[in-house]
């Protein structure tokens, strides 16, 4: 065995900083009865990975096990194939960064040039650039009727052809009132929203007074992309992350999630919803408080 192999084998395990975050946050949401409920939404934070001071990527994460996430990313991307090569992983949530130090230098330029951006979720490689473009975006007084939400959900349920046949895809739609102007399915929700953005660009379609529907969860990237398209209302059958929620508040986006059948939760912009078709009360009761929409 070579001396280098002996040195590698004798190196201690990398030092970890163990800076995990809480996975959920408590917020108030307005349900289909116009009443507020306390709900928990998933956390989401950007974590920029640096290896030997070289910026590699920004990941969007719950943040519960950041060191393991960083190590797994480097391993799965084939950046580093020997755990003994890593000296330390230090996570600092104040700077939203993970600093990895290795025992030896690596040719990161070559490795990064071969990286493939996948259709998967949570790898916010363009997060920083997107955030810089939000300074002048603010939606005001966008109104939507509860009856329109229900009609739109019913109409969209007739779509999703690929999902019905094969599963494994997300669907997104650009809508006006209760009708879909554009409907796209793809293996990743970001692919679907980007395709709709491209079609809007090609056909000079404005996002004003439109609603964006998605089957996927409302993360920060989804809220940012839809806001950049000029669409003030986002409707999802899935959930919301804490950063998606915070950005919706910042931008004035009406954020409606868990929307299926006659149920929905408005996490932001409930004052923009006209509750004109409130369903009959369910037999069981829950602790709520009425919201004034005067």
Image (cartoon, rainbow, N blue to C red):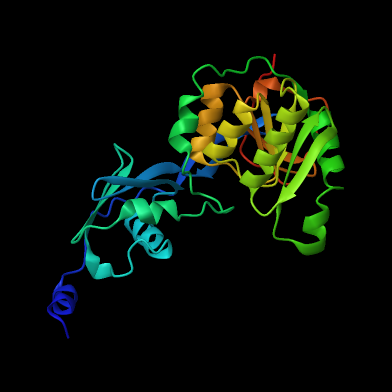
Q: Residue 274, located in which quarter of the rendered image?
A: top right
Q: Going 31% across and 43% down the picture, which residue do you hit?
A: 97
Q: Going 35% across and 50% down the picture, which residue do you hit?
A: 109
Q: Quadrant of the C terminus?
A: top right
Counting from the top left corner in percent of width and height, residue 45 is at 42, 42
Question: Is 223 located above or below residue 54 in the figure?
Answer: above
Q: Going 50% across and 31% down the picture, which residue do you hit?
A: 130
Q: Is residue 105 left or right of residue 251?
A: left
Counting from the top left corner in percent of width and height, residue 140 is at 63, 15
Name the one closer to the observer, 186 or 255.
186
Q: Is residue 77 left or right of residue 154?
A: left
- The count of marks equals 0
Counting from the top left corner in percent of width and height, residue 58 is at 41, 44
Q: Residue 173, located in which quarter of the rendered image?
A: top right
User: Is there any visible trace of residue 33 in the rendered image?
Assistant: no
Q: Is residue 157 left or right of residue 186?
A: right
Name the one closer to the observer, 194 or 172.
194
Q: Quadrant of the N terminus?
A: bottom left
Please identify the residue farthest to the bottom as the structure is shown: 1
Q: Going 79% across and 29% down the picture, which residue do you hit?
A: 146
Name the one closer to the observer, 190 or 261.
190
User: Is there any visible trace of residue 84 in the rendered image?
Assistant: yes
Q: Is residue 17 left or right of residue 20?
A: left
Counting from the top left corner in percent of width and height, residue 161 is at 83, 54
Question: Is 121 located above or below residue 167 in the figure?
Answer: above
């Amino acid at each position: 065995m070579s001396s280098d192999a002996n040195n590698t084998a004798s190196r201690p395990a990398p030092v970890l900083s163990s800076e995990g975050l809480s996975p959920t946050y408590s917020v108030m949401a307005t349900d289909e009865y116009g009443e507020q409920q306390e709900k928990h939404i998933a956390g989401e934070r950007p974590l920029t990975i640096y290896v030997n001071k070289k910026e590699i990527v920004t990941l969007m994460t719950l943040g519960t096990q950041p060191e393991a996430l960083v190590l797994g990313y480097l391993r799965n991307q084939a950046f580093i194939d020997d755990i003994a090569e890593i000296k330390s992983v230090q996570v600092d949530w104040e700077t939203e960064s993970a600093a990895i130090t290795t025992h030896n230098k690596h040719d990161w330029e070559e490795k990064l040039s071969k990286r493939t951006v996948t259709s998967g979720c949570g790898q916010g490689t363009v997060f920083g650039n997107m955030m810089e473009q939000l300074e002048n975006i603010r939606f005001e007084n966008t109104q939507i009727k509860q009856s329109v939400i229900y009609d739109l959900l019913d109409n969209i349920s007739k779509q999703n052809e690929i999902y019905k046949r094969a599963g494994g895809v997300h669907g997104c739609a650009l809508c006006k009132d209760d009708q879909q102007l554009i409907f796209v399915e793809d293996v990743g929700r970001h692919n679907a929203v980007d395709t709709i953005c491209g079609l809007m660009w090609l056909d000079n379609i404005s996002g004003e007074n439109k609603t964006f529907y998605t089957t996927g969860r409302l993360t920060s990237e989804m809220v940012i992309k839809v806001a950049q398209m000029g669409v003030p209302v986002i409707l999802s059958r899935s959930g919301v992350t804490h950063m998606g929620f915070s950005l919706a508040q910042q931008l004035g986006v009406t954020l409606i999630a868990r929307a299926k059948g006659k149920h929905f939760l408005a996490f932001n912009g409930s004052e923009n919803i006209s509750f004109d078709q409130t369903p009959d009360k369910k037999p069981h009761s829950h602790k709520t408080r009425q919201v004034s929409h005067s």
